[in-house]
Every structure is written in C-alpha cells, then in structure tokens.
C-alpha cells in the first residue's frame, strides 16, 4: 500500500521541535539558574562571627589559623625587638591589645602586628575602633592587657595579657594568661570575666602551663 498521508500537509520541522525543547528547558531550569547566579553575601563563622569562605565551625578544621594570646606574645616580641612604634615608645606595648595593630609606626601607618580581628576583640581598647569595624569576640574569646601583681605603673620591660571566653561555658571554660616569660598558663575560673592582674606565682594559684 502507498503512503496515505497528504503530501500537501505541513510536516513538523526538526528545528522547530528543538526550539520548543530549549524553550521548555529554559522555563523549567530558569529559577534554578537564577539562584545559582545570584550573588551571595559573606559567610560568617558560627563561633567568632568573622567573615570566612568557606564557612567553618569549631567542629570542623578551620581554614584560618586561630587567634590566641600566642599571637599577642609574638607581636609583643616583635614590637620590642624592632621598636615598631614611633613617638619614642620603647620596650613592650602596655596600653591595650588593639594598639598592636593600630599604633602608628615610624612611617605613620598602623604597625599591624596583629590582625584586625584581634584588635576588635580587645575588651578594653584605649580608643574607639570605628575605622576597623565593630568590636566582637574572636574565636569565642576576648583579650585584655593586664598588669603584674604589685605593679603600679606599667613597666615597659614587661607585659601581661589575658584571653577569656566571651560566653562561659559556651565558648569554653579556660582563661589564659601570658607574660614576657613566654609561658602560657590556663585555668578554669568558673566565669568568663578574665583577670585584672598577672599573679606573682601562677602555679601557686592553680594555673597550669598550656601543653
């Protein structure tokens, strides 16, 4: 038998069918594509609320090196050895923690011996830090420059620093202290208020060296 179809009837175009398929795919996949292309804001650490990419939590390996009193200890050694600050400042910096970033150097620019996140985590900065951002804990901790026991005026040949949990015990239980002897001590004080002075004999007062 021959072909019974009407030879004069229009036949579907392959190109037209392809165009219809592309149109349908665009209609169905468009929203997903738009969401994929939509710019995303910064991700924030669930612990210290510092912008990071990729995001991290304390339960994961953090892509950024944790900021601790050890970083402050290294910064103080650099400050003293290289006389970083102008204005005739010698020895260690005793004013606060933030100054290890904000103090003007000999060239007039901030010495930036610590990261901005460390400066913003100073719980008692000598001056406001609006140009750096909002003060916030770093890694769930606040930092403070303190004096030695019995010290009336800060001795530039010494320093003392404290790190304590922003929310005790959610951000940890340990408070950490360090001085120019470069031994970091830890102790659970039962609160997250930190300390005001570095003890004359940390071990006698129950502080243990950090492993």
Image (cartoon, rainbow, N blue to C red):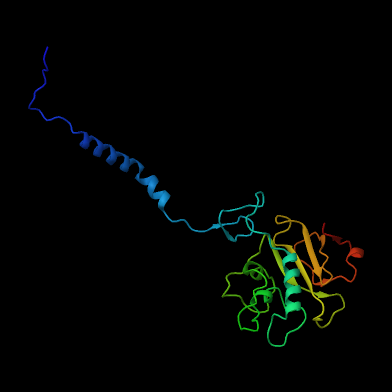
Percent of width and height locating residue 137: 66, 64
| 98 is higher (above) or lower (below) than 26 | below
| 10 is higher (above) or lower (below) than 97 | above
Q: Residue at x 7, y 27 (%)?
A: 8
Percent of width and height locating residue 183: 83, 65
Q: Residue at x 78, y 81 (%)?
A: 91
Quadrant where the N terminus sits is top left
Q: Residue at x 78, y 62 (%)?
A: 175
Q: Residue furthest top?
A: 1
Q: How many marks?
A: 0
102 relative position to 35: left or right: right
**Residue 208 falls in image quadrant:** bottom right
Percent of width and height locating residue 20: 25, 38
78 relative position to 20: left or right: right
152 relative position to 99: left or right: right
Residue placed most toward the observer, 188 or 112: 112
Residue placed most toward the observer, 14 or 136: 14
Q: Residue at x 35, y 45 (%)?
A: 30
User: Can residue 100 be spotted in the picture?
Assistant: yes
| 72 is higher (above) or lower (below) than 45 | below
Percent of width and height locating residue 154: 80, 81
Q: Residue furthest right?
A: 204
**Residue 86 falls in image quadrant:** bottom right
User: Can residue 193 be spotted in the picture?
Assistant: no
| 54 is higher (above) or lower (below) than 197 | above
**Residue 73 falls in image quadrant:** bottom right
Quadrant where the C terminus sits is bottom right
């Amino acid at each position: 038998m021959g072909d019974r179809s009407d030879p004069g009837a229009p036949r579907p175009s392959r190109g037209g069918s392809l165009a219809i398929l592309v149109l349908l795919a665009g209609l169905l996949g468009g929203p997903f594509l738009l969401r994929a292309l939509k710019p995303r804001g910064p991700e924030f650490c669930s612990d210290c609320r510092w912008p990071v990419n990729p995001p991290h939590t304390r339960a994961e390996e953090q892509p950024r090196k944790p900021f601790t009193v050890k970083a402050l200890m290294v910064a103080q050694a650099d400050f003293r050895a290289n006389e970083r600050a102008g204005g005739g400042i010698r020895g260690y910096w005793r004013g606060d923690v933030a100054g290890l970033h904000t103090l003007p150097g000999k060239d007039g620019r901030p010495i930036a011996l610590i990261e901005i996140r460390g400066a913003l985590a100073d719980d008692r900065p000598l001056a406001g830090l609006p140009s750096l951002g909002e003060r916030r804990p770093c890694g769930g901790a606040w930092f403070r420059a303190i004096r030695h026991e019995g010290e009336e005026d800060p001795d530039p040949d010494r320093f003392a620093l404290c790190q304590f949990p922003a929310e005790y015990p959610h951000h940890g239980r340990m408070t950490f202290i360090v001085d120019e002897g470069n031994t970091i001590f830890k102790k659970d004080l039962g609160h997250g208020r930190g300390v005001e002075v570095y003890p004359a004999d940390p071990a006698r007062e129950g502080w243990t060296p950090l492993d």
